[in-house]
Amino acid sequence: MKIKDRETLRLIKEALKEDRAEKDITTRILIPEGAVGGAELVAHQEGIVCGLNVAEACFKLHDGTIRFKVFKKEGARIQAGDRLGRVTGHLRSLLSCERVVLNFLNHLSGIATLTAAFVEKVKPYGVKIYDTRKTLPLFRKLEKYAVRAGGGYNHRSDLSGAAFIKDNHIDACGGVENALEIIFRREKPGVPVIVEVRNLQEAETAARYPVDLILLDNMKPGMIKGILKYFGKKRAFEISGGVDLKNVARYARAGITRISVGALTHSAKTLDISMEYIEVNK
């Protein structure tokens, strides 16, 4: 799938500009101007691949004559040794783009791989895994794309996507009730209203208002199970905070249907993928 989003294309251009791909001293000295060649993107560990379309855009924004062939689909599970794609064309262009291409590809594949691991853990319980806004500045659109590639779901994309009342809002307003009174005083906003609560009392207060989602923040599975039992199916709940791969199944068993995990984007390890030179016929 070719990238058409202008914001993403601009980000890729800035990444190439940052690395001074057009001023690659080493490659200009070692590689004759007219030399052609190829390279393959090769996985060195199991995971979920994401960002091959970004890799293609990197190469072609630098040199429109480059040819890129994809061997794996976005979101596919890959094994060590798998060839993910092949790029051919001016050898100078290929080598000058290598690091930027791999920075994107390794990072996005790492996010997709971690997301898939969370999704697999909660699969028996029908729970959906969501991301958060804990993303690298300016990389949010790509990182949330990687979450989807791994089978996860996206929370609001930015501050305009929902009226999300968090702990600092609550404390600044003097409590959950005061914050919700302000929100609903005029009329319900034209976006979803989400409120973060820290205990049963705050959850009871939030439930008196027509909020779309109540987020149970940093609670133990036992407390969550009790709150869900108390409210039944009258309210939509989500949990967040303190969730990792070791305990996510325990949280899922508490009866929740949504879990948001900041670690998907802020703590994912890069997936080991390299670019390896191959000879091609001229």
Image: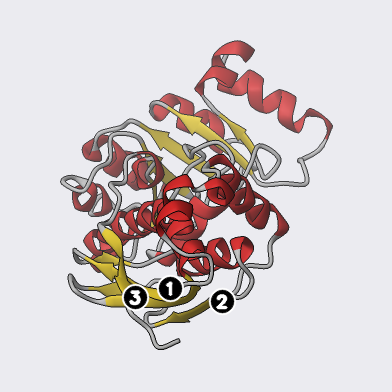
Of residue 170 and residue 159, the one placed in the foreground of this image is: 159
The residue beneath circle 3 is 84
Whole-angstrom CA distance, mark 1 to mark 3, is 10 Å
The residue beneath circle 1 is 74
The residue beneath circle 2 is 1
Q: What residue lies at 60% left-to-right and 73% top-to-bottom?
A: 2
1 or 2: tag closer to the N-terminus: 2
Based on the displayed image, in which of its 4 quarters is residue 187 positioned?
A: top right
For residue 116, say whether it is visible.
Answer: yes
Of labels 3 and 2, the one closer to you: 3
Q: In the rendered structure, which amino acid carries the disc numbered 2? A: Met
* In the image: residue 189, left or right of residue 73: right
Q: What residue lies at 24% left-to-right and 76% top-to-bottom?
A: 82
3 or 2: tag closer to the N-terminus: 2
Discs 3, 2 touching: Cβ within 8 Å: no
Q: What residue lies at 67% left-to-right and 51% top-to-bottom?
A: 10
Q: In the rendered structure, which amino acid carries the disc numbered 1? A: Glu
Q: Secondary structure at mark 2?
A: loop
Where in the figure is residue 29, as x and y percent of width and height?
A: 44, 52
Where in the figure is residue 60, as x and y percent of width and height?
A: 59, 68
Whole-angstrom CA distance, mark 3 to mark 2, is 14 Å
